[in-house]
Image (cartoon, helix red, strand yellow):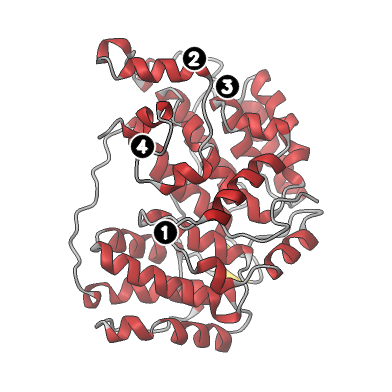
Amino acid sequence: SPRAEEASHIFFCNGIEDDRIRLTSTHPPLDERIKRIQTMMGESFVPEPKPMEEHAAGRSPDVGFQEPEAGPRSGSRFPSEPVRVADEPEEGTFVKRLSLPGVGAAKSSAFAGIDAKLALANVGVPVARHLVYAAELMEALPEPVRRATRDPRRATALIYVLLLSPVESVREAQLRLLKSRLSSEACLNLNTFLSHVRDLNELIKIPLVELTFAALRRMSLPEYAAFMENTSALIAADRQVDLFEFALRKMLHRHLEPKFKPVPKPDTRHTTLGELSTACSTLLSALAHTGQDTTQAAQTAFERAVHALKLAGGNIKFLAMGDCTFNAIEAALDDLAEAAAPLKKLFLDACAQTVAADGRIRPREAELLRAIADALDCPIPPFVSRDVCKTT
């Protein structure tokens, strides 16, 4: 049912099959739940969102800005130029996630403590330890951050802060941009989250983004448009796209866009792996390069993972790092989204094998893998380690 997720807030158990709800959802305020119950009684109870062109001029909503500004990312989800995985950042480059101040040690220790095979053994099948993780995650979050996941305006500010660059000059430019576009209340929210988010473990950030989806879906249409424009501007600030930004942008579109505009569900067009060889080659090569330090190690991880796909009829080839652009990744995800469910599962198993090849899961691997799985509507459980919920 189109309103299954809304109705699920009044159930005493999970009323829908989406396991992410059980892992990460939080109850909205009581008055909001009452409003959602009213929506099931007829459309007359629900005010229609105002058309975007009716948004008044002047100061924008708290999540938005005054006037959209044209820029290098205007009208495009990702840069049109090839974006590559590289150790040395260049203009338009797909860069590895830079370590935030004060979290490098915590990030490394958290991932060193994860057994990759164990973490990836239950892809698509949450088990008890993942529920414990979700509870510990919520408990470990600072109270202002925890509250922000339940409120649309605070949630937008939280996303903005997560997108701030660790490079001081870029970060200052991003903050100036936000302060020129946001209301004074929204700017106060930014200041509230700055110190809290800076100290969060890298491993928590994508699951934290997922926690905000329920609140963000309660934005108005103008607020949504402004929010997406602002996130694009923040990502474009350093003329680079890293894996965290890629994963966040992809997930925001998938989880929010259907709430505000008609989005047709992809048809099942691919029923054999032979039709998906290029897509599988692109994504598995990107994962392998992302998780390994040398081309030889990346190819070893790739070959270890593709055996089952080749047996199933796929002509899967290892691609050079330079061929793993965001445009290629985007096209590959679109193709795989139209694959039959058994093929998606087989492909995700190969992704898991690629990531587990060296026995550890790095932050950038986790970000790309979660983006792939989410885009295919086959979300994976959070990666669990004993200390992952701790802040530094």
Residue on which the image places disc 1: 124
Viewer-side residue, 138 vs 286: 138
**Disc number placed over residue 62 in the picture, else none:** 3
Give the spatial CA distance, label 2 vs label 1: 33 Å
Between marks 1 and 4, how big is the CA–CA gap?
Answer: 17 Å
Observer able to see residue 241: no
Classify mark 4: residues with Cα within 10 Å, few (<14), some (14-19) or many (20+). Answer: some
Q: Is residue 299 above or below residue 83?
A: below
Give the alpha-carbon distance from disc 4 to disc 3, as whole Å.
Answer: 33 Å
Q: Which residue is mark 4?
A: 15
Sequence-first tag of 2 and 4:
4
Q: Residue at x 47, y 43 (%)?
A: 22
Q: Callout 2: 10 Å neighbours few (<14), some, many (20+)? A: few
Q: Which of disc 3 and disc 2 is earlier in sequence?
A: 2
Asked whether residue 293 is in view, the answer is yes
Q: CA distance from mark 2 to mark 3?
A: 21 Å
Query: In the rendered image, which quarter contains the N terminus?
Result: top left
Q: Are marks 3 and 1 in contact (CB under 8 Å)?
A: no
Indicate the amino acid at tag 4. Gly
Do the CB atoms of the residues marked 2 and 4 lie less than 8 Å apart?
no
* Vertical position of residue 152 compared to residue 371: above or below: above
The reply to whether callout 1 and callout 4 are in contact (CB within 8 Å) is no
Q: Which mark is residue 31?
A: 2
Residue sitting nearer the eye, 173 or 268:
268
